[in-house]
Structures are given as C-alpha cells and as structure tokens.
Amino acid sequence: MTALISLVADVLRVPSAEVDWDTGTATSAAWTSLRHVELVMRVEREYGVKLTAREARTCRSVRHLHDVLAEKGVQV
C-alpha cells in the first residue's frame, strides 16, 4: 500500500483495503464532490504542491492523482 492510497482512504473515510489505483468518482460512492475538494486540499498540503484548477477538476481517480503528482516531480 502506498501513502497516497492511505491518504485517499483517510479522506474518503473508508478502510485502506477498499482503495486501489482505480478508486475514483466512478467507482466509489464515498468520493463525493465535498470529499474531492478535501482530497485536493490534503494532497496539496501533504505533498507540498499546488494543483491547477484544471488538474483539481480532472483528478477523478487515485491513478490520475498519482500521475499528476509524478508530473510535478513528487515521488509517491
């Protein structure tokens, strides 16, 4: 399990075992619009990055969050 998966599970308030790379808005009822905003803010704080408005809007899965962080040079 990665730190990103743990972070997502914490924000979504679900067990880490329920979160994988494909968890996202289309696969998890826990990933609501409010939790999405919380997740973006937490990712920015935890990883010391700033997501653009477009990145924040389009990060709709753990995998996509990982890819955006990797593009910013963050190791997750």
Image (cartoon, helix red, strand yellow):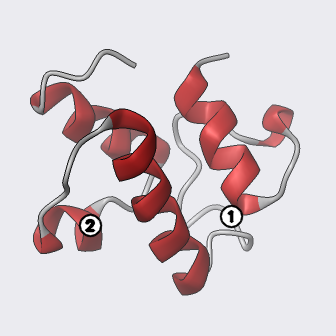
Residue 5 is situated, as x and y percent measured from the top left of the image, at: 61, 33
Residue at 54% across / 69% down in the picture? 38
Quadrant in which residue 12 is drawn: bottom right
Image-based side of 34 in relation to 13, left or right: left
Residue 1 is situated, as x and y percent measured from the top left of the image, at: 67, 16
Q: In the image, which disc is placed on residue 1? A: none
Sooner in the amino-acid sequence: mark 1 or mark 2: 1
In the rendered image, which quarter contains the C terminus? top left
Image-based side of 65 in relation to 37, left or right: left
Q: How many marks?
A: 2
- Measured Cα–Cα span from mark 1 to mark 2: 18 Å
Residue 25 appears anywhere in the view: no
Q: Secondary structure at mark 1?
A: loop
Judging by the rendered image, the residue that carries numbered circle 2 is: 56
Could you tell me if the residues under marks 1 and 2 are in contact, i.e. CB atoms within 8 Å? no
Residue at 73% across / 73% down in the picture? 29
Residue at 53% across / 58% down in the picture? 24
Amino acid type, residue under disc 1 in the picture: Ser
Q: Secondary structure at mark 2?
A: helix
Image-based side of 23 in relation to 15, left or right: left
State whether residue 24 is above or below residue 8.
below
Judging by the rendered image, the residue that carries numbered circle 1 is: 28
Badge 2: residue crowd in 10 Å (few <14, some 14–19, many ≥20): some
Residue 13 is situated, as x and y percent measured from the top left of the image, at: 82, 58
State whether residue 8 is above or below residue 38.
above
Residue 37 appears anywhere in the view: yes
